[in-house]
Image (spheres, helix red, strand yellow):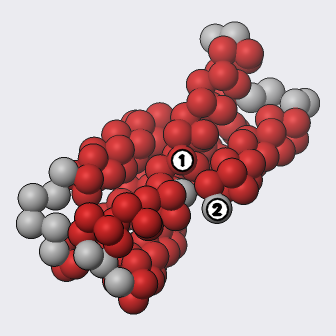
Amino acid sequence: MNAQFISFLLHGSNLWYAMLKRSLAASVPLMRKQFGLTYKDIGDCSSYFSFFYGIFKLVGGVLTDFIPSETVFSYGILLGSLINVAIALSADRSRRSIVLLWGLNGLCQGAGGPALSKMVLEYIPSSSRSFYWSSLLNVSDSSYNRSV
């Protein structure tokens, strides 16, 4: 495949992951208003997300050794997106269900980093990896700065 096409796919999917990760910060005012969550509840969501995200960074790294990285990356985006929709459409809107769903969101998204790293190593020539890797990190950082 063409390196520019692969770069487009990697940047687009990395941006999607970054937006999913930052969706809690953008939705806090609405979640407090519609779901009646307190700042403690939002803090619990953030803590559960970080905990499961960190655990699955390790597990995702191991998974990408046995399962194709494209599969891990794709399922992470798909499941993370579906969980974000499930949070928005949650019928019972209880604190427990939202915190649990947000923790599962972290679990799904934790696999993104290791899978992306492996895809860069597989598809980008070694002579231009540093350029692509730095631009992929900038996509994630710039989306964070815009959402906070």
Q: Is residue 24 visible?
A: yes
Marks 1 and 2, the one that precedes in the sequence = 1
Q: Are marks 1 and 2 in contact (CB under 8 Å)?
A: no
Residue 63 vs residue 147: left or right? left
Q: Quadrant of residue 43?
A: bottom left
Instruction: Residue at 69%, 10% (x, y): give it.
Output: 2
Q: Position of residue 48 (x, y in %)?
A: 39, 78
Q: Position of residue 73 (x, y in %)?
A: 46, 42
Q: Which residue is mark 2?
A: 148
Q: Which residue is mark 1?
A: 19
Q: Quick one: SS at disc 1? A: helix
Instruction: Residue at 54%, 47% (x, y): give it.
Output: 19
Q: Position of residue 135 (x, y in %)?
A: 80, 39
Residue nearer the viewer, 128 or 74: 74
26 in relation to 140, above or below: below
14 in relation to 8, above or below: below
Q: Position of residue 110 (x, y in %)?
A: 48, 60
